[in-house]
């Protein structure tokens, strides 16, 4: 295929994905905003004053970056896993595969759609958070790059989930039993410095910890993890997931079987 044709194929998949989640915005955009708003009210306004300051900041201000990134993580992942599995179930993905469209373009198209939803939800949640917290930005580049890389990583993770899923129930297993616990234990509501030394070491095995701390640094200028380590972990996981997904897609895993 020529580059112009590849570009058209990529944009077509992206447009389809964005149209898909914006058409049902009541189900894809509103629920995460309501859920996050409840976190702001319960943990920030009701529980926060009893906890006091965290790392020198109001508890509400401390948890806002983590809650924003949590919405990006869950929506980037959910969009790709459900969309790609639906394409498998309806066998529409086979029509794309028999075309000259490279597998890398198919993968990037779905991933970009998932990133678009995750980042859009993150922007809406950020706007809502302004009603509860006076957000300040310490480093714009870190904030934007981390939200982009995190959306990319979990969109790739959602694609893998969609590839391995055999039935609709399989799409929700990983988010429920893996993603949600890792997110809550990733330092959204606390600093890992409060944990005993052993549990601090255990927490370092959680990749979401690095993303949340780097994103919090973008807003507040504080982090339990060095930025270089956070970027290395996120980029390394993204590269590995991209290569694995591309190989599985080229082999037709979960599609032709």
Image: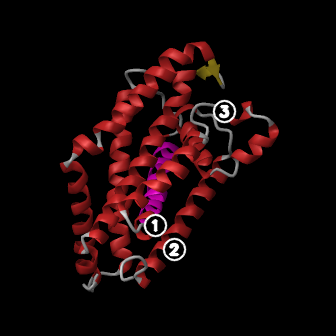
The disc label shown at residue 160, or none:
1
CA separation, marks 3 and 1? 31 Å
Q: Is residue 149 magenta?
A: yes
Look at the image and give the residue range highlighted in magenta. 141-160
Q: Secondary structure at mark 2?
A: helix
CA separation, marks 2 and 3? 33 Å
Q: Secondary structure at mark 1?
A: helix
Instruction: Pick whichever of labels 2 and 3 is earlier in the sequence.
Output: 3
Q: Quadrant of the N terminus?
A: bottom left
Whether residue 52 is visible here, answered yes or no, is no
> What percent of the width, then of the height, locates residue 32?
36, 38
Residue labelled with disc 2: 244
The disc label shown at residue 191, or none:
3
Kindly give the residue lying farthest to the top in the view shown. Answer: 50
Residue drawn where x is 41% and y is 78% of the image: 249
Instruction: Pick whichever of labels 3 and 1 is earlier in the sequence.
Output: 1
Q: Is residue 234 magenta?
A: no
Q: What secondary structure prevails in the magenta region?
A: helix
Q: Nearer the viewer, residue 211 or 165?
A: 165
Residue drawn where x is 45% and y is 69% of the image: 164
CA separation, marks 2 and 1? 8 Å
Where 30 sits versus 232, above or below? above
Query: Are circles 2 and 3 on residues that touch, CB within 8 Å?
Result: no
> What percent of the width, then of the height, locates residue 126?
39, 33
Quarter of the rendering containing residue 54: top right
């Amino acid at each position: 295929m020529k580059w112009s044709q590849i570009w058209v194929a990529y944009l077509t998949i992206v447009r389809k994905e964005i149209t898909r989640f914006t058409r049902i915005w009541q189900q894809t955009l509103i629920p995460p905003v309501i859920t996050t708003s409840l976190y702001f009210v319960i943990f920030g306004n009701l529980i926060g004053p009893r906890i006091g300051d965290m790392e020198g900041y109001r508890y509400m201000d401390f948890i806002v970056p983590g809650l924003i990134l949590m919405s990006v993580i869950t929506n980037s992942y959910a969009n790709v896993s459900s969309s790609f599995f639906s394409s498998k179930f309806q066998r529409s993905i086979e029509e794309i595969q028999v075309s000259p469209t490279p597998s890398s373009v198919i993968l990037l198209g779905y991933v970009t759609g998932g990133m678009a939803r995750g980042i859009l939800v993150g922007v809406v949640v950020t706007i809502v958070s302004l009603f509860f917290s006076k957000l300040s930005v310490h480093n714009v580049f870190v904030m934007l790059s981390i939200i982009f890389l995190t959306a990319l990583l979990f969109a790739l993770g959602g694609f893998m989930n969609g590839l391995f899923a055999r039935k609709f129930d399989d799409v929700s297993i990983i988010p429920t039993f893996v993603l949600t616990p890792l997110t809550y234990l990733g330092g959204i509501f606390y600093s890992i410095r409060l944990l005993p030394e052993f549990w601090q070491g255990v927490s370092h095995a959680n990749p979401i910890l690095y993303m949340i701390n780097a994103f919090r640094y973008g807003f507040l200028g504080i982090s339990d993890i060095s930025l270089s380590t956070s970027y290395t972990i996120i980029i390394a996981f993204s590269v590995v997931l991209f290569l694995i997904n591309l190989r599985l897609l080229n082999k037709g895993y979960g599609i032709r079987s």
